[in-house]
Image (spheres, rainbow, N blue to C red):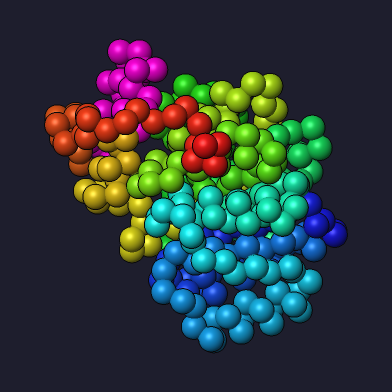
Amino acid sequence: MECPTIAALVATSNRETLLCERSVPTIFAQTVRGARLVVVNDGEPLSEEARMYLETTASACGVALSVVKNDRVSGAAGAWNAGLTHLWRTGHRGFVALLDDDDTWDSDHLEANLAQAEDADLVVSGLRMRAGGVIEPRPLIDVLQERDFLTGNPGWQGSNTFVAMPTMMAVGGFRDGLASLNDRDLALRLLRYPGVRWRLTGRWTATWNRDTPGNLSAAQSQPKLLGLQRFWRLYGRDMGPHEEAAFFARAERLFGFDRLTIERTMDVGSTPDSEYGSLHE
């Protein structure tokens, strides 16, 4: 299937082995052909070997490749925004599909999303979790409700994000400098966008490798604490008492940060965040 209306976007930082041996090969193996691929580098320059692999394999697969440097705030959000800006400036108005550099897609991931995309602004497929080489059970999302993302994540993360570019740009893309919880922040802003239309594939087509070193979801990590702090500042006022309790209980259970730690170390004097992401400003 030929489809130049899809662009795959990967952000990477000093993990070119994972990029070239795990994630990108699953993009090149897609049943959908003709898609674009943008790799945003947020670390040291890619080696000549990595560049040759990307360029030669992309050419052989008929994939239009761009490798760009992150010229925004360092971090995942800034890198994704650099890629979105590149796509928008070069005229891409179709869908953008994200893949983390340590995750993988099934060969029909893009095809499954595209099949639901005709009357949708965003499509979400099933995202498996793998830890220690073992797939962990996880239910498929059966409905997208924005309030679910205030207290946790039912299964919509970076590697199963598939959004129309005009909609992604309208909500401002990602929030530069948000150290973690980018998935929940983006989901909330997309689902709150007036008239947004969403669909679900109802199938597992992507895999999240949860235990990769440097994972932003690692317990007791500084990026996770900073993300929880800022997310609380952004959305705490939207939570009812039960949602607030669930938010802090989950933060302590999964990441080891109690309410006192999140609130005590929060930068309460900083300027309030916009309701939009960084590309809106």
Q: Where 83 sits versus 114, above or below?
A: below
121 or 27: nearer the eye? 121
- The residue located at (75%, 47%) in the rendering is 94
Left or right: 23 as drawn, with respect to 238: right
The quarter of the picture where residue 99 lies is bottom right
- The residue located at (63%, 34%) in the rendering is 170
Q: Residue furthest right?
A: 2
- The residue located at (66%, 63%) in the rendering is 37
Q: Residue furthest bottom?
A: 49
Q: Where 84 sits versus 185, above or below?
A: below
Q: Main secondary structure of the magenta part?
A: helix
Task: Report if residue 188 lies within the magenta region.
Answer: no
The quarter of the picture where residue 164 lies is top right
Residue 54: give x, y in percent of width and height. Answer: 62, 77
142 or 281: nearer the eye? 281
Left or right: 253 as drawn, with respect to 111: left
Residue 59: give x, y in percent of width and height. Answer: 75, 77
Left or right: 172 as drawn, with respect to 228: right
- Residue 100 visible in rendering: no
Residue 24: give x, y in percent of width and height. Answer: 59, 68
- Residue 49 visible in rendering: yes
Residue 148: give x, y in percent of width and height. Answer: 46, 25
- The residue located at (33%, 22%) in the rendering is 236
Q: Quadrant of the N terminus?
A: bottom right
- Magenta region, residue range: 231-255
Task: Report if residue 242 lies within the magenta region.
Answer: yes
Q: How many marks?
A: 0
